[in-house]
Amino acid sequence: MRVVTLGTDPERWRPDVHAAGEFRRRRDLPDGRWLVTVARLVAYKGIDTGIHLLASLCADHPDLHYAVIGRGEDEAALRTLARELGVADRVHLLTDVGDDELAAAYSVGDVYLGLTRETSTAVEGFGIAFVEAAACGLPVVATRSGGIPDAVVDGVTGILTEPGDSDGARNAIVRLLNSRDLRARMGSAGRSRVEYHGNTRRVVADLRAIAAELGR
């Protein structure tokens, strides 16, 4: 058996402060610090956990917002949850973001959240969004679930927590919010890892090496 982890294009996905500012203006997004998730709006992606954590952090971090980019069956439920927790003005479900805007959407963020959990029918296979976020210079807070540890290097490009450990996820977010240096260090490490490993050139090279090994 050979494992070939996915990669992305570091030329397309890259930090872009100007594009992020334009994205904010077009979407009328307020200033402040941002958590970002790019995912389908379905239960196992754990976006509800992110909304709960945002609500718990607002008192100590009044400038914090959460941008969720994606579409899915749980949109109405997530909007209702945000209202019930009193953070509807801080949770921005952006369901109409096109592929050409995604890099700018990532660049709005200060921390990328991927708090997925396993269910009876779903698990995160790898999570290309983690690699795209890293390429855009974002540190990642994610769960140690499915293929995520192949995409996020714990303590280097982000912080991994156990699925269902809300306190652990909250502490990881607070660590990053409270340390510009830590955010910059992990963001830079994530970007470098995509440039030297998590890219499509390496994926092609791995596949060609396997083909050569098999005599194809």
Image: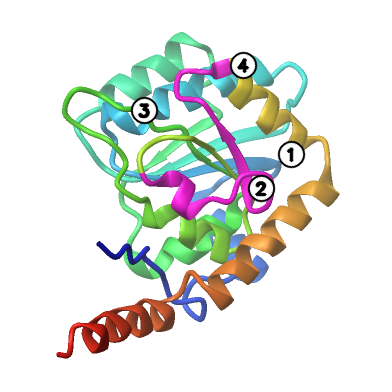
Residue type, numbered disc 4: Asp
Of the image marks 2 and 3, the number of the one nearer the N terminus:
2
Q: Which mark is residue 176?
A: 1
Contact flag, marks 1 and 3 (Cβ < 8 Å): no
Amino acid at circle 2: Asp
Residue holding disc 4: 167
Query: What's the CA distance linking mark 4 and mark 3?
Result: 15 Å
**Mark 1–mark 2 distance (CA, rounded to whole Å):** 9 Å
Badge 2: residue crowd in 10 Å (few <14, some 14–19, many ≥20):
many
| Residue under numbered circle 2 | 110
Q: What residue type is labelled 1?
A: Leu
Q: Where is residue 116 in the image (x, y as percent from the top left)?
A: 39, 32
Q: Is residue 24 a member of the stretch shown in magenta?
A: no
Q: Earlier in the sequence, mark 1 or mark 3?
A: 3
Callouts 1 and 2 close, C-beta under 8 Å: yes
Q: Work out whether mark 4 precedes mark 3 in sequence or the reverse, and give the earlier one.
A: 3
Magenta-colored span: 147-166
**Depth order, front residue of 97/212:** 212
